[in-house]
Image (cartoon, rainbow, N blue to C red):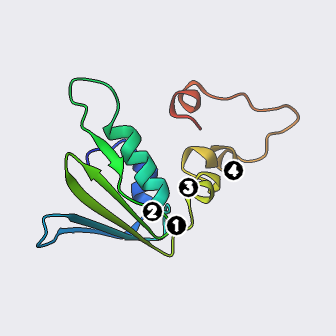
Amino acid sequence: MAALSGEAETLEACRDLTWWRTTDHSWHVEWRDGPQAAEVAALLVERIGEPGPDAAPAAPAGPATASTAVIDVMEVTFVLRAIDPFGMERLRSRPGLWRLSAALDGPAGAGERSRQHWEELLGG
């Protein structure tokens, strides 16, 4: 979960996010809506395996699909399961808080509205 903490939009898109440890000491993570399991697995492997002093060995542990993926992190298995996922592409295309700023500002008038410094900073 710490590896996903920088992905607030991704986590907020997931409904019913749950995780539990099984008797074989693997972790299962399950959610509704949100990104596909393969997308989350690729993101986690990339985030966890970043070079640095805290780098942990992370790798896919089998084929990943839209609904299921398995990764190994420091010899611990994580089974990811997405129920009715809509994918990252659709998530990114949905209007977010900062992307709605133009709609909230009303009509642009005669000229094009310039972006505010906070919109540039926050990626809006």
Which residue was labeled with disc 4?
103
Q: Nearer the viewer, mark 4 or mark 1?
A: 1
Q: Give the CA distance from mark 2 to mark 3.
A: 10 Å
Q: Which amino acid type corresponds to the residue marked 1 in the rendered image?
A: Ala
CB under 8 Å between discs 2 and 1:
yes
Q: Badge 4, how many Cα within 10 Å: few under 14, some, many 20+?
A: few
Give x and y (percent) for residue 80: 35, 64
Give x and y (percent) for residue 53: 21, 24
Q: Which amino acid type corresponds to the residue marked 4 in the rendered image?
A: Ala
Question: Where is residue 17, by image quadrant?
Answer: bottom left
Give x and y (percent) for residue 19: 24, 67
Callout 2: helix, strand or loop? helix
CB under 8 Å between discs 2 and 3:
no
Q: Which amino acid type corresponds to the residue marked 2 in the rendered image?
A: Ala
Please report whichever mark, 4 or 1, sits nearer to the chain's N-terminal start.
Answer: 1
Callout 4: helix, strand or loop? helix
Q: Nearer the viewer, mark 2 or mark 4?
A: 2
Which residue was labeled with disc 2?
37
Q: Give the CA distance from mark 2 to mark 1.
A: 5 Å
For residue 23, above or below residue 96: below
CB under 8 Å between discs 1 and 3:
no
Please report whichever mark, 3 or 4, sits nearer to the chain's N-terminal start.
Answer: 3
Callout 1: helix, strand or loop? loop
In the image, which disc is placed on residue 88? 3
> Closest to the observer: 7 or 73?
73
Q: Give the CA distance from mark 1 to mark 3.
A: 11 Å
Direction front: furthest residue:
62
Give x and y (percent) for residue 44: 37, 47
Q: Give the CA distance from mark 3 to mark 4.
A: 23 Å
Please report whichever mark, 1 or 3, sits nearer to the chain's N-terminal start.
Answer: 1
